[in-house]
Amino acid sequence: MRDIRIENSFFYDFRISSGVMSKKFKNNYSKRYIETPLGIVTSSGHWFHTTEDQIESYAPGLLRKYDLDMLVRAAEAWIKSADALALLLYLGLVFTLSPYLVLGIVLVLHVVWFFNKSAFITPGLSKLMQLITSDGTLLIASLVIFSWLGISERYTALGLGLILFFLLKLGLIRRLWEYLDRNRKGWITLNDRLLKMIILRYAMKENIEIEEVDSMDEQIRELVIRKNKS
């Protein structure tokens, strides 16, 4: 075991030169991820089946312009965006429409956004999504609206809202769509599709030529298979 470096108080890089294991720990105040030979896993439990070296091979020079932690945080925000937008839509419409109708609208929006959100990824919208999906934004909005529903004695709307809040907060609805999505031909995980699109969009912004595009999905599937076997 050799080559152990501590670069600063927020970044730890631990490497074993034999190649058996390579992990990178990074903590940017609120975010932390671990890089392993099977991919990147975040503090929120999201897996991305790629590595820093592979990203560098896809988009040479991109990681010199954008920190990997920033790209991962952007991908996490898009992963959670369907849940956040659905909750905010419920909170915004529940005073004007029947709570059952609003719930139906929200579920339709959730599934449509889930399967199509990668088409809307841009660097600018990624920053907006990080704000929208933050715990502070969602908790404050929920507290205000739920309190008002309680004061107004709209208990049906309040009860449906609380149920929806916990389903979305736990990611249960999103996991249902992910499970159904697995039967699609040539499937790769939602997380990987989003991170791939973020890499492409940020590279386009910086006029970085993307290399080995055709091999990206294949390398992702290979890491998924290896992880499932481990």
Image (tube, rainbow, N blue to C red):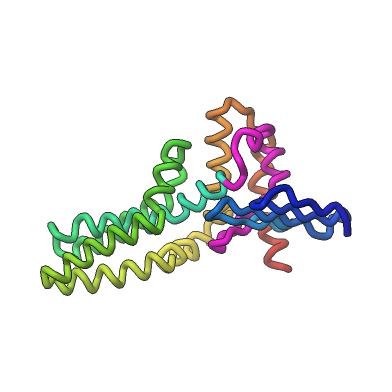
Q: Is residue 209 visible?
A: yes
Q: Is residue 163 above or below residue 33?
A: below
Q: Closest to the observer: 2 or 209?
A: 2
Number of numbered discs visible in the structure rendering:
0
Residue at 52% from the left image edge and 57% from the top image edge? 184
Is 1 part of what is drawn in magenta? Answer: no
Residue at 56% from the left image edge and 37% from the top image edge? 200
Q: Closest to the observer: 218 or 207?
A: 207
Where does residue 166 sit, x and y in percent of width and height? 36, 70
| Magenta-drawn segment | 41-69
User: In the figure, is residue 129 to the left or right of 221?
Assistant: left
Q: Closest to the observer: 228 or 184?
A: 228
Where does residue 90 sit, x and y in percent of width and height? 25, 59
Q: Is residue 153 above or below residue 91?
A: below
Residue at 61% from the left image edge and 54% from the top image edge? 27
In the rendered image, which quarter contains the N terminus? bottom right
In this view, the residue farthest toward the top is 207
User: In the figure, is residue 17 to the left or right of 123?
Assistant: right
The quarter of the picture where residue 88 lies is bottom left
Where does residue 218 sit, x and y in percent of width and height? 68, 49
Residue at 72% from the left image edge and 57% from the top image edge? 36
In the rendered image, which quarter contains the C terminus? bottom right
The quarter of the picture where residue 86 lies is bottom left
Is 59 part of what is drawn in magenta? Answer: yes
